[in-house]
Image: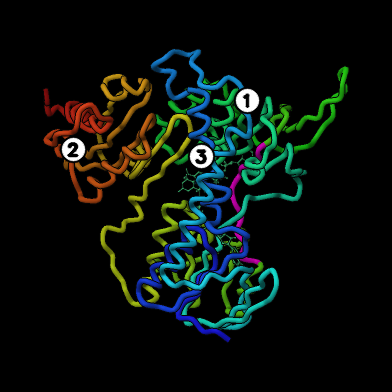
């Protein structure tokens, strides 16, 4: 039986970075993958394919350039699923090779099969052809999640779909109901609407992406409606069924009944109301680890489960469940496991959120609502993209950047951006916040011109002027 210093279960972002960190520390490492390809949701069903689809849609429809060339601008008139899929496939193939090479270069044993604990330090890897028993001193559980699929919903891989099946559609539907206004629901609603699909989005709360600053959320509602998306807010889906309409010729549609009594019909339905863990098949009872009702694990600040040599990172530990945070959690878990503790500027309060809707949205720090609730005095400084030369050049005159500035200390408490480049732009604010900077930093700093970064200077002027510190 082979023995390792460290065994990592799952090759998503949390597992990859954990395994490589362990190898860099000179440890003997194995990583296990039950899927037929590497990379987990990040590469195969989540981050990369959805972002590749978004880029392809923005490019082929010409939507990103319409601010410059007019509303009728098109790059390709008839867009097919094949046009859209090829971009994803190219990026995915590149990523699979990259991950495999990284494992080889770092002498990490890659074992294909489903891992299951059979004893306190012992695992079986049930591969396609044989099962292999291995032991290790430390473990990192990075098994991710899968889309929630309640038994009451008649998923059929064709018209009633989760985000996994959406990527395998063989034709573009004319209409789609999206259930769930979280990150997955809103990103795909925007992508589909940009392609010309008639989208109705149903969200149980009064705002999509309920964690956003209200002003940004309201602006986003406006942009979605402008794109033709019908928003059904504060509405819950009660039941979903396939129906056949006989009106001349037979048509198969999906029908969603809402608790309010409304009935929605469309060719397809995307069900995106969260994700579910996969811990049930890991044999965790053989080690003495419990999981919650959504099959997620509880960990301490060092990513240790209740059994101190078994760590967990990534989506399996719940919020914020992002590729970006998963990578760092995996790395940190392993550093702790092998006594390499470092704190650096790791501040979970400054985790950024990037939403690749159309338009992009990004945030770091507190919202206006949180600051008000916590009784922290602040002023909001706003830069509208219409005042920014670079945004004019990009044809985006509707975006905005908002800085939340402490009224007394002028420290930056939050940054919220909606518009072109939001997910990149946010990191300037994040860095200044991490270094405890204030709004004057942006006034006294020179930015390249023309750049979107100029928004920071304009927003700082705006906020400080409202505080009666008159800056020309
Ligand atoms: C549609 C969509 C879009 C997204 N967009 C973004 C985005 O833009 N930005 C962002 O930061 N995040 C995004 N995410 C989230 C991101 O994909 C996840 O947070 C990230 O993939 C989680 O990484 P992970 O390593 O925890 O798990 P995963 O990536 O899920 O990987 C887990 C791996 O473990 C394997 N595994 C499971 N059980 C076993 C077992 N018993 N034995 C062996 N292997 C096992 C699985 O096969 C899988 O390969 C998106 C997610 C979705 C669904
Ligand atoms: N850009 C990104 O970072 C990105 C992109 C996509 C996904 N993700 C990750 O994927 C995870 C899962 O995303 P998600 O959007 O599936 O889940 P989510 O939990 O973020 O959102 C689900 C939404 O569905 C709503 N809802 C629940 N039941 C409903 C019902 N019956 N009718 C109407 N609305 C209902 C909820 O109020 C909620 O707003 C997220 O946690 C996120 O971390 C991240």
**CA distance separating discs 2 and 1:** 43 Å
User: Ligand 2 is located in which of the four quadrants?
Assistant: top right
Q: Which of marks 2 and 3 is nearer the N terminus?
A: 3
Q: Which of marks 1 and 3 is nearer the N terminus?
A: 3
Q: Mark 3 points at which residue?
A: 52
Question: Residue 84, position in %: x, y?
Answer: 58, 34
For the N terminus, the quadrant is: bottom right
Q: Mark 2 points at which residue?
A: 439
**CA distance separating discs 1 and 3:** 18 Å
The span picked out in magenta is 270-280
Query: Is the C-beta separation of discs 2 and 3 under 8 Å?
Result: no
Mark 2 residue element: helix
State which quadrant residue 286 falls in. bottom right
Decide whether residue 103 is among the magenta residues: no
Residue 305 in view (yes/no): no
Decide whether residue 278 is among the magenta residues: yes
* Label 3 near ligand 1 (CB < 8 Å): no
In percent of the image, x 53 and y 33: which residue is there? 206
Question: Residue 385, position in %: x, y?
Answer: 31, 23
Q: Name the residue under label 1.
A: 197
């Amino acid at each position: 039986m082979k023995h390792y210093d460290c065994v990592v279960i799952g090759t998503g972002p949390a597992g990859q970075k954990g395994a490589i960190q362990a190898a860099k520390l000179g440890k003997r490492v194995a990583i296990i993958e039950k899927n037929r390809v590497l990379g987990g949701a990040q590469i195969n069903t989540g981050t990369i394919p959805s972002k590749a689809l978004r880029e392809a849609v923005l490019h082929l429809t010409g939507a990103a350039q319409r601010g410059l060339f007019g509303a009728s601008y098109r790059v390709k008139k008839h867009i097919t699923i094949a046009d859209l899929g090829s971009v994803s496939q190219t990026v995915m193939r590149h990523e699979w090779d990259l991950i495999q090479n990284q494992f080889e270069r770092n002498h990490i044993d890659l074992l294909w099969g489903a891992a299951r604990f059979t004893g306190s330090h012992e695992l079986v890897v049930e591969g396609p052809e044989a099962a292999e028993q291995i032991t290790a001193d430390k473990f990192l559980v990075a098994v991710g999640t899968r889309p929630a699929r309640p038994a009451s919903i008649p998923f059929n891989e064709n018209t009633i779909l989760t985000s996994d099946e959406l990527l395998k559609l063989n034709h573009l539907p004319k209409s789609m109901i999206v259930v769930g206004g979280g990150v997955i629901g809103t990103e795909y609603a925007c992508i589909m609407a940009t392609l010309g699909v008639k989208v109705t989005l149903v969200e149980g709360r009064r705002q999509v992406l309920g964690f956003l600053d209200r002003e940004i959320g309201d602006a986003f509602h406006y942009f979605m409606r402008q794109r033709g998306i019908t928003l059904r807010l504060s509405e819950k889906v009660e039941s979903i069924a396939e129906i056949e309409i006989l009106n001349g010729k037979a048509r198969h549609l999906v029908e969603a009944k809402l608790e309010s009594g409304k009935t929605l019909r469309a060719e397809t339905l995307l069900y995106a109301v969260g994700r579910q863990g996969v811990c049930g098949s890991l044999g965790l009872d053989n080690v003495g680890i419990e999981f919650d009702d959504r099959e997620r694990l509880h960990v301490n600040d060092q990513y240790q489960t209740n059994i101190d040599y078994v760590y967990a990172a990534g989506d399996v530990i719940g919020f914020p469940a992002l590729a970006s945070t998963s990578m760092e959690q995996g790395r940190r878990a392993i550093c702790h496991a092998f006594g390499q503790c470092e704190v650096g500027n790791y501040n979970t309060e400054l985790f950024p959120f990037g939403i690749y809707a159309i338009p992009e949205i990004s945030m770091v720090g507190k919202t206006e609502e949180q600051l008000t609730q916590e009784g922290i005095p602040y002023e909001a400084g706003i830069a509208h993209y219409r005042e920014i030369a670079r945004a004019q050049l990009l044809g985006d005159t509707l975006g905005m950047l908002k800085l939340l500035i402490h009224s007394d200390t002028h420290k930056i408490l939050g940054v919220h951006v909606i518009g072109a480049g939001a997910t990149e732009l946010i990191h300037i604010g994040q860095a200044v916040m991490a270094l405890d900077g204030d709004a004057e930093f942006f006034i006294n700093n020179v930015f390249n011109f023309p750049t979107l970064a100029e928004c920071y200077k304009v927003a700082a002027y705006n906020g400080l002027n409202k505080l009666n510190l008159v800056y020309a």
